[in-house]
Amino acid sequence: MNREHLRILLPVLSLAVLLAAVFYLQPRAMSYFGLNLLFNLAIPVALATIAQMMIIMVNDIDLSIGTFVSFCACVTATLVNDTPLIGYSILAISVLAYAAMGTIIHLRGLPAIVVTLGMSFVWGGLAVLLLPSPGGAAPGWIRDLMTIKPPFLPMAIIAALLIGLVTHLLIKRSALGVLLRGVGGNERAMERAGWSVVRLKATAYGLAGLFGVLAGMTLVGLTTAADANIALRYTLLSIAGVILGGGEFTGGKVSPVGAVIGALTLTLAASFLSFLRLSPDWQIGAQGAILILVLAVRLLFTRKRVLS
């Protein structure tokens, strides 16, 4: 078993253990309808986690992804629904804005954590201006897409499999993915080899913006309305999902499939804590405890492997 297999093994085991615990507490969840309810809200979380993974892959971190997803959800529930041309144009400009943010961070040598924290207030302000109170409506095609009922597996699981497969092929099997991971692994070596690190970082941020837009659109498709604060928790959940899925903050070491599994695990953890009748005020702390436990186990395995 190589290092890549070990990286993916722990999140798979974490998801399996948590799923078994949920089925033990609530046997009726072991059905098509039950699985759909458990994982339905995991789709936008998985997309936001992939967006965060694109940034972490180039050794940065994004503290604005939660407010960005909220902004995209507000645009989808208002402008995309009422005036599609303007709405889709704004979403496209948002992706370009993300790419521009990556360019500025690299050219000016600014800390990504500060820039993205500042941008979180920009996205949050725009979302409030667009939708001061909860409302709007999901476009018909998005609502229909998110409520499809395939014959054998719930839509949520099929969507998670597709997200994991597509991003795995993009990051692990394509030339672009190799270059992007190379930026995270050794930026100076990439520059000496003649590659434009600015262009690659802009691409990574642009991809993050694209997946953030998709997260906002799918979230509106599930909730059928939007709110300026609808996805604030996604910032922490996305970071936790990447790390839980085997990613690391440096070195370009990420796992797209692991990140999707990490997002599913965190979503399932919320359901598990609800079945335990734990107060929502304690659920964030409990999710953090689960993350620390998994990381501790991973560190233990890593040390044993180094010593051996």
Image (cartoon, rainbow, N blue to C red):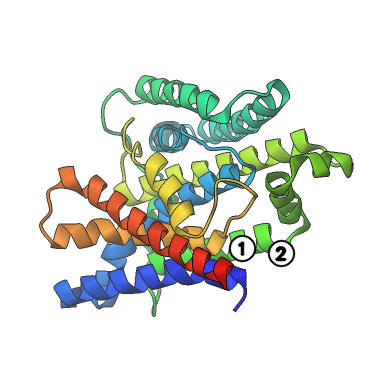
Q: Nearer the viewer, residue 148 or 115?
A: 115
Does residue 158 appear left or right of residue 174 in this picture? left
Q: Nearer the viewer, residue 265 or 203?
A: 265
Does residue 141 appear left or right of residue 190 in this picture? left
Other-residue count near label 1 (Cα within 10 Å), few / some / many at <14 / 14–19 / ≥20: some
First of labels 1, 2 by sequence position: 1
Other-residue count near label 2 (Cα within 10 Å), few / some / many at <14 / 14–19 / ≥20: few
Vertically, is 34 above or below 214?
below
| Position of the N terminus by quadrant | bottom right
Vertically, is 202 above or below 170?
above
Q: Which residue is mark 1?
A: 168
Q: Position of residue 243 (x, y in %)?
A: 47, 53
Q: Which mark is residue 118?
A: none
Does residue 292 appear left or right of residue 4 in this picture? left
- Circles 1 and 2 in contact, beta carbons < 8 Å: yes
Q: Nearer the viewer, residue 77 or 250?
A: 250
Q: Residue at x 39, y 75 (%)?
A: 153
| Position of the C terminus by quadrant | bottom right
For the residue marked with disc 2, what is the amino acid? Arg
Task: State the SS at label 1.
Answer: helix
Q: Is residue 87 visible?
A: yes
Vertically, is 81 above or below 9?
above
Q: Nearer the viewer, residue 289 or 229?
A: 289
For the residue marked with disc 1, what is the amino acid? His
Q: Separation of disc 1 and disc 2 at Cα? A: 7 Å
Q: Which residue is mark 2?
A: 173
Q: Residue at x 36, y 62 (%)?
A: 265
Q: Residue at x 61, y 63 (%)?
A: 168
